[in-house]
Image: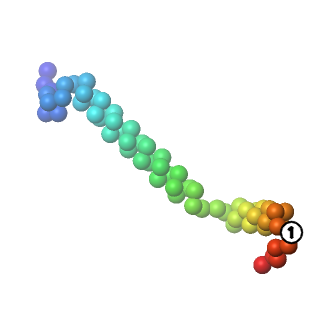
Amino acid sequence: MSDSGIGMLLGQLSANLLWLWFIGAFVLGGVLVYGVMKAGHLRRSERAQLDRNTEARQRQEDPYKRPT
């Protein structure tokens, strides 16, 4: 049975764990990229609802504040 170069240096178990570590880092990076891309975008209706909620909260907290 023939080992790869890294398998001979680290042992077969260590080589497998190293590959699992790289795969895990790749998956985690993909999840983070997806989250960052998704977090920055709101649909028009979501943005309007957020603006209405913000204005209502500001009027509730400071009734003397003038609407802009």
| Label 1 crowd (10 A; few <14 / some 14-19 / many >=20) | few
Q: Quadrant of the C terminus?
A: bottom right
42 with respect to 52 (left or right): left
The vertical placement of 49 against 67, above or below, is above
**Quadrant holding the N terminus:** top left
Q: Is residue 31 visible?
A: yes
Secondary structure at badge 1 equals loop
Tell whether 60 sits left or right of 7.
right
Name the residue: 19% across, 25% down.
11
Residue for badge 1: 63
Task: Pinpoint residue 33: horizontal percent, then vertical percent.
Answer: 47, 53
- On the image, which quarter does residue 5 sit in? top left
Query: Which residue is found at the position 81% from the left and 63% from the top?
Result: 61
Q: Amino acid at mark 1?
A: Pro
Identify the residue shown where x is 30% and y is 30%: 17
Residue 48 shows up from this direction: no
